[in-house]
Structure formats: structure tokens, C-alpha cells
Image (cartoon, grey):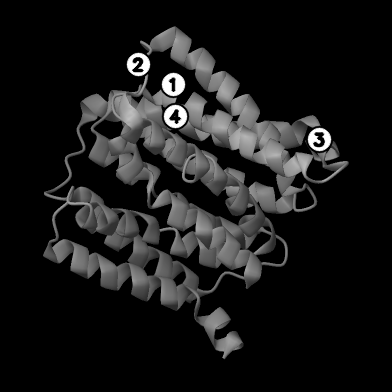
């Protein structure tokens, strides 16, 4: 239960992504990723320095590094590519089928048992997410096939990263520090190749960038790693659909978004679906 709650804190952090990104100004995505993952690396180094000998956690075999860097950098690389080549709404919705892939894919993990309520709860969350993200409607056009394909790659990369991380449960979460450092370096290379440098201006934008690195595009990856390795990965997958709902509610509270009937229905679908997916855990705790 404790590990699942720790993993859930990542979902809460990801709820702040839209607001903090909006407040960060016009910083290009790869430049923003490089800064945020640098901050995430510093978080990990601070934790490592407080425990003598913990730096040994960075000495991992190449498959672990391939999984970690491929998951963190690969997801962001394909996500940014998708946004460059397809409408943001459609691309975002395709990319966000990763919670469903995690729940279904968990059946392949040793010791895991996939129940009907896991799938039903996750589908309810997906339906709620469609209501939130789709807004006034969806329009999938053939001219954006490449963008849609890269968005789908995002979903498979993140779900694969999360599922396979559980197979590497013996790898300490401290290793994520190295993954963040490598991702920051690769994001910087992509920025120098494809983007024009734009620095944040003013205290608000700098605080937003720091907040991104501290939480949704940084610290969240540490607690997610711990959660998927030691918690209930099926419940975490189903609960992940709460992130766009919380994000929308935060934007409304900040005066950036507007309430609507879709948000109310999505709230019922997502919370109900999460409760259904977690029914075994809730019953056991009672």
C-alpha cells in the first residue's frame, strides 16, 4: 500500500504539468526538458550524497541503462515529435493510452493477476480522459499519420518502461539519477540541433521551470520508479487517468480553464473507474 501511494504521488505531480508549462513562457520543449532533467539530476545527487556508498547504484549493466534512458528520453523525444507533426489534442489523447497498456500488459508480469475490474476501471478512466482532452471534438486526418504514429510510440515506450522496470525490481531507485543526467544531455543535443534558445524571463517563469524540474518533469520519475517496482502496478495504471482530470481542475482554479458538464462526467468516470480497479485493495484494507 505504501509503495502504491508513493507511486500515486507522481500522478499528483503530473497534474501540475499543464499549469507550470503554461507559466514557463516560450522556452522550447527540448531546452525545457534539458533544464528540468538537470534539476532532477541534482535532486538525485543530493539524495546520493546524503548516504555514503550510495553512488554504487549508478553502476548498472547496459540493459538497465538502455531501459532507463530509453524510457525517459525516448518518451519525451517522441512526444515532442508528435506535437510537431500532429494537432496537440489528438496527439495527446493517443499518447495517453499508456495507462491502459500498463494495466493490460501487467498480465504478462510474473505473480500478477489481471481481473475484469482492472480493465473495466481503466477503460472508464480512458473514457473520462477522452471527454477532457477532446473538448469540442476530435478530427483524425491522414496528413498527420506520422504525428499520430509517434504519439502511439510514446504510449508504448512509457508503458514498456513502467512494466519492464518491475522486472528490474532489484535495481535501486537511486539509479534514476543517472537516467535523468543522460536524458538532460540528450535533450540538450536535440535543442542545439533543432531549436532556438529562449530563456525564461521574470521570476514567475523561472519558478515555473524550477517547479517542473522539481515535480512533474523530474522528481516524479523517482517516486514512479519506486511505485511501479514495489506497489500495485495495475492500480497505478488505472489511477493515472486522474492526472488529466486533476490538471484540468487546477487550470480551472487558476482561472486558465473553464468548468463544463464534460468535466463533471469525466470526474465520475475517472474516480469511479479508479475505485473499481482498486476494489481488491480497498476491500483488503477494510
Disc 1 element? helix
Tell me the tag on residue 161.
none
Q: Mark 1 — residue? A: 31
| Neighbourhood count class around disc 4 (C-alpha, 10 Å): few under 14, some 14–19, many 20 upward | many
Q: Mark 4 — residue? A: 78
Residue occupying the point 46% across, 36% down: 210
> Could you tell me how far apart the alpha carbons at marks 4 and 3 are, in whole angstroms?
25 Å
- For the view shown, which residue lies furthest in the bottom direction? 286
Location of residue 283 in the rendering, given as x and y in whole percent from the top left corner: 55, 88
> Could you tell me how far apart the alpha carbons at marks 1 and 3 are, in whole angstroms?
27 Å
- For the view shown, which residue lies furthest in the right direction? 53
| Neighbourhood count class around disc 1 (C-alpha, 10 Å): few under 14, some 14–19, many 20 upward | many
Residue occupying the point 22% across, 57% down: 253
Whether residue 232 is visible to the viewer of this picture, yes or no, is no
| Neighbourhood count class around disc 3 (C-alpha, 10 Å): few under 14, some 14–19, many 20 upward | few
Q: Is residue 280 above or below residue 95?
A: below
Circle nearer the viewer, 4 or 3: 3
Location of residue 71 in the rendering, given as x and y in whole percent from the top left corner: 58, 37
The foreground one among 22 and 61 is 22
| Neighbourhood count class around disc 2 (C-alpha, 10 Å): few under 14, some 14–19, many 20 upward | few
Q: Is residue 173 above or below residue 131?
A: above
Amino acid at each position: 500500500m505504501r509503495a502504491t501511494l508513493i507511486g500515486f504521488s507522481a500522478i499528483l505531480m503530473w497534474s501540475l504539468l499543464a499549469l507550470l508549462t503554461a507559466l514557463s513562457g516560450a522556452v522550447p520543449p527540448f531546452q525545457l526538458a534539458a533544464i528540468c532533467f538537470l534539476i532532477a539530476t541534482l535532486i538525485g545527487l543530493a539524495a546520493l550524497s546524503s548516504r555514503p556508498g550510495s553512488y554504487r547504484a549508478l553502476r548498472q549493466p547496459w540493459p538497465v541503462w538502455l531501459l532507463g534512458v530509453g524510457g525517459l528520453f525516448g518518451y519525451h523525444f517522441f512526444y515532442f515529435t508528435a506535437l510537431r507533426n500532429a494537432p496537440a489534442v489528438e496527439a495527446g489523447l493517443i499518447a495517453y493510452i499508456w495507462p491502459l497498456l500498463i494495466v493490460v500488459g501487467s498480465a504478462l508480469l510474473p505473480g500478477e493477476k489481471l481481473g475484469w475490474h482492472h480493465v473495466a476501471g481503466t477503460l472508464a478512466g480512458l473514457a473520462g480522459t477522452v471527454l477532457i482532452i477532446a473538448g469540442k471534438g476530435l478530427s483524425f486526418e491522414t496528413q498527420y499519420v506520422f504525428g499520430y504514429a509517434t504519439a502511439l510510440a510514446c504510449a508504448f515506450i512509457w508503458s514498456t518502461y513502467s512494466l519492464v522496470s518491475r522486472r528490474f525490481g532489484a535495481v535501486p531507485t537511486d539509479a534514476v539519477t543517472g537516467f535523468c543526467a543522460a536524458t538532460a544531455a540528450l535533450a540538450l543535443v536535440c535543442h542545439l540541433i533543432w531549436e532556438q534558445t529562449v530563456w525564461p524571463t521574470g521570476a514567475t517563469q523561472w519558478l515555473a521551470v524550477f517547479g517542473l524540474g522539481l515535480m512533474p518533469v523530474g522528481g516524479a520519475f523517482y517516486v514512479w520508479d519506486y511505485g511501479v517496482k514495489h506497489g500495485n502496478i495495475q492500480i497505478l495504471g488505472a489511477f493515472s487517468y486522474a492526472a488529466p482530470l486533476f490538471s484540468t481542475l487546477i487550470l480551472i482554479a487558476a482561472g486558465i480553464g473553464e468548468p463544463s458538464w464534460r468535466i463533471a462526467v469525466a470526474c465520475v468516470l475517472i474516480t469511479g473507474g479508479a475505485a473499481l480497479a482498486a476494489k481488491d485493495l480497498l476491500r483488503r484494507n477494510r
